[in-house]
Amino acid sequence: MSRKKVPVLVVAGFLGAGKTTLLNHLLRHPRGARIGVVVNDFGKIGIDAMSVAGQVDAAVSLSNGCLCCAVDPEGLDEMLGRLTRRPIDVVVVESSGLADPRVLIKMLLNSTDERISYGGLVEVVDAAEFATTRRDHPELDGHLRFADLVLLNKADRAADLDGVLRLVRELAGGTPVLPTSHGRVDPELLVDARAAPVAQQLSFDELLADDEDDHPHAAYQSVEFSTAEPLHPRRFMRFLDERPAGVYRMKGFVHFGPADPRAFSVHTVGNFVRFAATRRPATPGTHLVLIGAGIDADRLHADLAACRGVPDDTDEHAMLDVLRYLR
Ligand SMILES: Nc1nc2c(ncn2[C@@H]2O[C@H](COP(=O)(O)OP(=O)(O)OP(=O)(O)O)[C@@H](O)[C@H]2O)c(=O)[nH]1
């Protein structure tokens, strides 16, 4: 039986930006997702966090040094293999501060392990020390641009948060930038909960209602979109390309009708897009949840509604852009 591939999300950032803090936060608030982690230094991941997540053994670590330098592709595959032997929904890999995350990403993209697929790059940036980090590591600008999502952490300590946010957004080009404190992002933004089809999950409003006070739900909005009609693959890909920067996360199922009879799951983290061909969901059609901040729900609805349609008979390659993101 073929199993769903496990996305491997890379968390990068320069020294002290808050990568471990983010990992601990995700482990403490897994929202039903079974999270495996690969960390550089096991000591920094709170054992209590692993216990909360009920997965004390779902972590591997290097006793020293940096993943990219200490591990060759086979070594990485072996580590991931150990994690994905048990049911797991996502693996989060912490990339050491000084390494270029692209080395690790390349290893993941070239992995021969059929059970995993690269799941995107989250760059954690220290908002309080941004100028110093940038001065010491000019390569930071490049990291911001090729990340899929930038978390501007330590927002609580930044002397001029608006100014830093403006600058980071400008440097990041099209990469969405989300301010956070103590890595407290909603896990829904990064990982898929262990769940039935999106249509049967709790709505975001329901999630808003229930949590501890350190859970920053209130900052986000969710927009749901469903249609029984097929989406036109080219129009939908254009929508993804042009989606507003405030849409941090999108997940659900898409149906392209006659262009491809399969149902596809779609999953985005920031700019990262992943499609997977799935078994057809119980209700054929498209069901999407978009999560973000400062987004115009009516506009998103209208833009998605405009994606409905089927390619004409002469457009044989209409699915190509979608298939490029198939993992
Ligand atoms: N005030 C404040 N402190 C934070 C925040 N996030 C992390 N910290 C603190 O900053 C320090 C560094 O955080 P880590 O999570 O260890 O950073 P890291 O990126 O994993 O660090 P390295 O692994 O050394 O690169 C710790 O003392 C955290 O408690 C934040 O948003 N605000």
Image: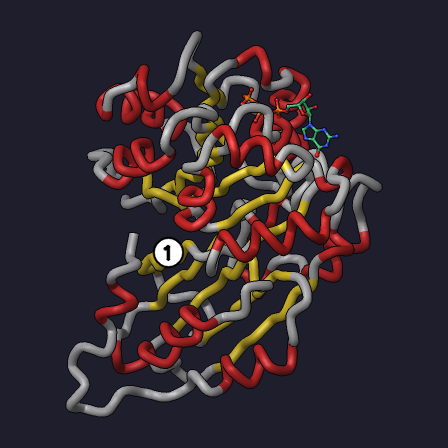
Image coordinates for residue 286, horizontal then vertical, percent? 46, 74
- Quadrant hosting residue 262: bottom left
Task: Say above or below: 34 vs 251.
Answer: above
Q: Image point 29% across, 52% down: which residue?
A: 327
Residue lying at the far front in this picture: please name it.
135
> In the figure, is residue 171 to the left or right of 321?
right
Q: Nearer the viewer, residue 34 or 112?
A: 112
Residue 116 percent location from the top left of the image:
32, 39
Q: Quadrant of ligand 1?
A: top right
Q: Can residue 149 be seen by looking at this rendering?
A: yes
Q: Is residue 255 above or below residue 117?
A: below
Is the residue marked by circle 1 packed among few (<14), some (14-19), or many (20+) residues within 10 Å? Answer: many
Residue beneath the point at 23% across and 35% down: 111
Residue under numbered circle 1: 274
* Residue sitting at the far right: 213
Q: Is residue 26 visible?
A: no
**Residue at 18% across, 77% down:** 317
The scheme the figure's colours follow is secondary structure
Q: Quadrant of residue 259?
A: bottom left
